Amino acid sequence: MYFNPLTKSLFIMKHPSQIILFIFFYNFFSNVQAQTYNLNVSNEPFGFLQNPQSAVQGPWDLLAFQIPLGFDFHFFDITSDSLFSAENSFGGYTSLNQDEENLYMMIHFYAFLIDRGYQQDSAASPIYYKTEGLPGQRIFTLEYNNAGIFNGLQDFNGVFLDYINIQVKLYESSGDIEYHFGPYSIQEDPEIVFDGYPGPFIGLFADCQNVLGGDIGEVILLSGDAMKPTLVTDPFSVVNWPIPENTVYRFSRTTATSDPNFTHEDLMISPNPANSYVHLSRTGGRVEVIDATSRMIYNEYIEEDNLDVSGFTPGIYYLRMISKDKISTGKFVRQ
């Protein structure tokens, strides 16, 4: 294996403005608001898209595309029917709009991504997308297929050896967002791959002014252990590498987030897996149950600490209990 510093130097000379752009996001931020999304972490098999469409043609270095979602998607306080990648994104994030003074971004894996065959002018890392499902329950998926890691290892021919597979899923019915990590090979030192950090930036940005001295309206980043990360508003927070293959980070919209005293906590659910009833660790709130396709199948206020799940189809379910000043979240399996 051969690490080619000359290749990287030429790339940076070719695109100097793009290299420093994302630093502005982290050097200038203010007006952080209450958290609009909470987080569930799970481990689920990674399935590659079948018969997808191509978002890019040929080998790519700095991604630029605009692709349709197939439905209106609500993200923070905007609605969009398209997903964008500008040349300054490095493939590490996408946006739901193109307003540089009010940019809304999904940061799914902030590392410099590049087509593995770019230096041979040979496409080896296709970017795919697909929208599936019935109206009202559609799911959009963006797939990075064997995306090369620019700061990773290369062979003597300049082929990028380190790579990763990632899917970004947007759910029409709930507004949920998923980042799903598939097979990867990253053998280089993480602090080299991630520019001095122990892992990647992963999260969501809202109302970001992509100009020198600009502000970020709301920042939500994952921090710490890859399987037990916390949601923080610290713009220098990263997920510690490695992230286990098949990990899913699911961002779900909360309610009552305008209240600065609104808090989030884990909801204990037992037994888990369950057959007929589940016991909840708190009561006195509206309970939402969402299935694995992001379809809400239950939405009722309950005062009991038991929930009847005997009528649920076997599978994985996400549960949210919402009260005036608190939202509790958990996941259970119906056998």
Image: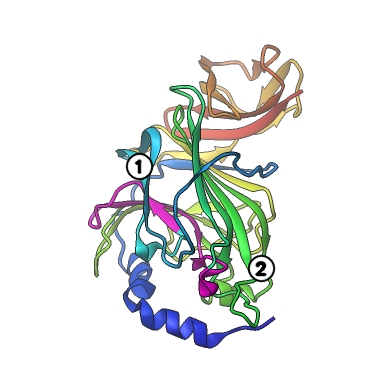
| Spot occupied by residue 193 in the image (x, y as percentages of width and height) | 57, 73
Which residue: 36% across, 74% down? 20
The mark nearer the N terminus, 1 or 2, is 1
Q: Left or right: 206 with respect to 319? A: left
| Spot occupied by residue 187 in the image (x, y as percentages of width and height) | 69, 72
Which residues are drawn in magenta? 93-121
Per the image, the residue denoted by label 2 is 186
Q: In the image shown, does 22 or 27 lie closer to the viewer?
A: 22
- Counting other residues with Cα less than 10 Å from the Cα at mark 2, is it few (<14), some (14-19), or many (20 or more)? some
Q: Answer with the quarter of the image where residue 107 lies.
A: bottom left
| Spot occupied by residue 209 in the image (x, y as percentages of width and height) | 26, 59
Q: In the image shown, does 32 or 96 lie closer to the viewer?
A: 96
Q: What element carries label 2?
A: loop
**Rendered-image quadrant of the C terminus:** top right
Which residue: 75% across, 29% down? 272
Per the image, the residue denoted by label 1 is 82
| Spot occupied by residue 12 in the image (x, y as percentages of width and height) | 41, 80
The kind of residue tagged 1 is: Ser
Q: What element carries label 1?
A: strand
Q: Which label belongs to residue 216?
A: none
The kind of residue tagged 2 is: Ile
